[in-house]
């Protein structure tokens, strides 16, 4: 029987090989088509992410022009603009915390990428949040990540978790804003509630999700805190006699964070424009004069928009890296 098999192989020209040849021929062709399709998709996704970033630049320029028309520059001395510039640089640096938090979320879901790639991708796509719709920075980041070979499902989960963590981080400061809404509630009670809630949330992330998720949450809390402190610095420099007590500063910082959060999650508001101002005027009535508050809000917008643009530039200048090399 073995000789027959051997003879059949010799006499029939190795039929086993003949049967396998078509499959072997089809497999490379299918793989080549699939590879070509993926390469094309990655190219188009990369173009989409870049196009969204360029459109974001246009809207940032438009936004800065609108803000400049609302400010009477003759009323400010040179030192004020130094403070505004310094706050913009500080906000640019703080944006790296957001990028690192996103990188930790990618790690949480199994996509270990270089930090530099995460910062660059986040910074380039983030500018598109000024495009009306308030979702294009997320779509741009998704497209750029998939073009770099990161799992689309991982990117989608990281976006969902980012919004959730930011919502939790910002809402914690609501405890410090309650005295503005309920005057009879003492601020020390709000501070105690804030500390307890922060500890409980941090413990929950550690126990149920791990260190990467905890680091991301800590970075988000730090970022929103810095944002509030920068807003407080603007008011202190422009209107040094507006608030004189430490409790007032704490409530002012927290009110800004809560207003920022509401603007962030409001659909259709590019970077929360308009929503943030409305919430601040409501929360801080009686604590800060409305005219002073509106002017500070406009300058705060100049700080955040300029800071975001600086972050975009520094991210763009970072050397490209491949997530697959992590």
Image (spheres, helix red, strand yellow):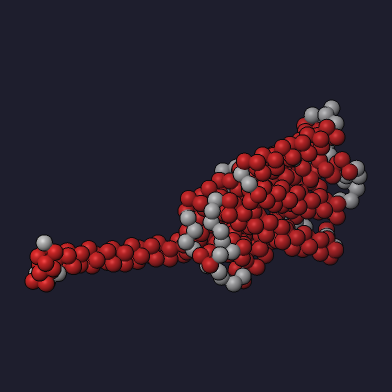
Q: Position of residue 99 (x, y in %)?
A: 63, 57
Is 20 on the left or on the right of 265, as rendered?
left
On the rendered image, what quadrant is the C terminus found in? bottom right
Given residues 311 and 235, the one toward you in this image is 311
Count of marks overlaid on the render: 0
Q: Residue at x 74, y 40 (%)?
A: 198
Is 171 on the left or on the right of 107, as rendered?
right
Q: Position of residue 242 (x, y in %)?
A: 87, 46
Q: Residue at x 11, y 67 (%)?
A: 3
Is 88 on the left or on the right of 135, as rendered?
right
Given residues 94 and 214, the one toward you in this image is 214
User: For residue 317, which quarter of the picture?
Assistant: bottom right
On the rendered image, what quadrant is the N terminus found in? bottom left
Q: Residue at x 47, y 53 (%)?
A: 152
Given residues 146 and 48, the one toward you in this image is 146
Figure check: 176 above or below 13: above
Given residues 16 and 316, the one toward you in this image is 16
Is 312 on the left or on the right of 135, as rendered?
right
Q: Position of residue 203 (x, y in %)?
A: 70, 40
């Amino acid at each position: 029987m073995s000789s027959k098999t051997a003879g059949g192989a010799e006499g029939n020209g190795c039929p086993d090989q003949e049967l396998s040849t078509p499959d072997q021929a089809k497999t490379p062709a299918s793989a080549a088509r699939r590879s070509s399709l993926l390469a094309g998709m990655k190219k188009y996704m990369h173009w989409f992410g870049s196009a969204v970033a360029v459109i974001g630049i246009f809207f940032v320029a438009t936004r800065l022009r609108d803000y400049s028309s609302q400010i009477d520059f003759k009323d400010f001395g040179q030192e004020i603009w130094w403070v505004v510039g310094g706050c913009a640089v500080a906000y640019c640096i703080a944006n790296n915390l957001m990028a690192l938090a996103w990188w930790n979320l990618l790690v949480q879901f199994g996509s270990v990428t270089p930090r530099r790639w995460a910062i660059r991708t986040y910074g380039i796509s983030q500018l598109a949040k000024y495009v009306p719709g308030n979702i294009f920075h997320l779509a741009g980041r998704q497209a750029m990540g998939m073009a770099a070979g990161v799992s689309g499902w991982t990117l989608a989960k990281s976006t969902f978790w980012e919004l959730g963590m930011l919502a939790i981080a910002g809402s914690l400061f609501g405890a410090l804003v309650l005295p503005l809404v309920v005057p009879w509630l003492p601020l020390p009670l709000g501070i105690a509630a804030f500390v307890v809630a922060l500890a409980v949330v941090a413990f929950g992330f550690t126990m149920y999700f791990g260190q990467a998720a905890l680091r991301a949450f800590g970075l988000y809390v730090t970022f929103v805190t810095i944002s509030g402190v920068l807003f407080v610095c603007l008011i202190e420099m422009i209107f040094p006699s507006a608030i004189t007590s430490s409790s007032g500063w704490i409530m002012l910082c927290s009110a800004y964070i809560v207003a920022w959060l509401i603007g962030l999650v409001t659909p259709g508001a590019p970077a929360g424009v308009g929503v943030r101002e409305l919430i601040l005027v409501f929360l801080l009535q009686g604590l800060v004069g409305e005219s002073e508050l509106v002017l500070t809000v406009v300058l705060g917008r100049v700080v955040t928009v300029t800071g975001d643009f600086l972050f975009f530039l520094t991210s763009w200048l970072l050397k490209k890296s491949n997530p697959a090399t992590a």
